[in-house]
Image (tube, grey):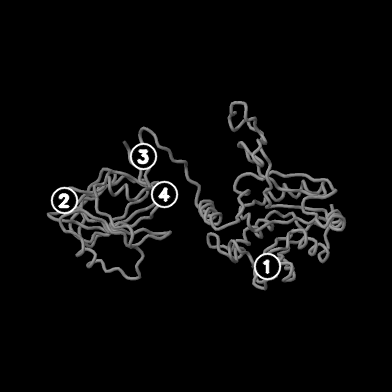
Amino acid sequence: MGKIVVMIPARMGSKRIPKKNIRLLNGKPLVCYVIDAAKASGCFDEIWLNSESDLLREIADESSIKFYKRSSKLSEDNVGSDLFVEDFIKNVECDIIVQILPTSPFITPLQISGFVQKSTGFDTTVSTTPIQIECLFKGDAINFDKKLPTPPSQDLEPIQAYACSLMAWKTKSYLSNMKKYGSAYHGGDGSVASYEIKGYGSIDIDNEEDFLLAECVAKALSSPNQDPKYYDDNLVYDANRLRVLLEDGVDMNNMDNFNKEIAHVPEIINNNPDDHCWSHTLINSESTCATLIAQMPGEGNRLHYHTDWDEWWYIIKGTWEWYVEGKSIKVSQGDVVFIERNKKHKITAVGPGQSIRLAVSREDVDHVYTV
């Protein structure tokens, strides 16, 4: 089998996403995702980070992997993979080189090990992802007949598109193709195999929109597994905060002036009517959403619960009846009300005038109603 090394190319000069390889994805530098996956796979004799940047050298040192400093000329926009892979091979002894792109942060150790195992039998191994939908090339149908009824998508022949996350070459074949053709990335004269990458591992970050989507995926993957939620005849899940407030009868909602460095609550209250319901969002961040809610006697929210969030309220003004799992308690100014997740609850203003509470939760929390 010989010596197998992995090379992670990570230049600093990206134009579409500036400094993308060191940009934080869910609090972790992008390049560190594939470094950690490569280490966890246990497939490699050596792991190398290939860059022109000394800052990337620091990341390599912190990750206890090797660093190869390519020339600034090989890091220019017009230099393709063929050349910097050739440069690396000529300077780092190996029999098989595997390339992992940092722009595929969700590649798994298991996918890497499966890919490496297959690559030992071929001169070039390409990672692909299946596209199982009707596809065109220059206007012509590739995997369907335009004159026949469209088949169910599951019956279509998948198109195998380059995933680019993983590539592998036997170094002797690679250098031979470079000498003969001036290119070797796609295999040249040698044997070529493909390895299918499915799921999150096929995500490739090329532009800002991709990065934002990847941020959502990274946060979801780092969260505890949750049971799927459905709309059915008995339960409604609603995470639309404005709709929840409106259906609770709060028709004056200021939701656009949050996260001020200082917000003076008495001033906000004085600037709103004292004979009508209203809400004012004070904080809305990734971790917390805090909203002032004012309601008149008899008004409040509907009976509901949250499956994955503990909620609390601070009573600023008036008297409220707190109802939790069949138990009623009256609370008033200065009280803090805490609701554990999965407990059915509601709160109703019962004082002689307007009552105000500070509701602390999170923007994306589902309100689950039984109907």
- CA gap between label 2 and label 1 equals 63 Å
Mark 3: amino acid:
Val
Report if the CB atoms under discs 3 and 2 are less than 8 Å apart. no
Q: Mark 3 = which residue?
A: 236
- CA gap between label 1 and label 4 equals 38 Å
Element type where label 2 sits in the image? loop
Q: What number is the disc on residue 297?
A: 2
Element type where label 3 sits in the image? strand
Q: Earlier in the sequence, mark 3 or mark 4?
A: 3
- CA gap between label 4 and label 2 equals 30 Å
Above or below, 362 against 92 in this view is: above
- The mark closer to the camera, 3 or 4, is 3
Q: Earlier in the sequence, mark 1 or mark 3?
A: 1
Report if the CB atoms under discs 2 and 1 are less than 8 Å apart. no
- The mark closer to the camera, 1 or 4, is 1
Asked where in the image residue 236 lies, by quadrant, the reply is top left
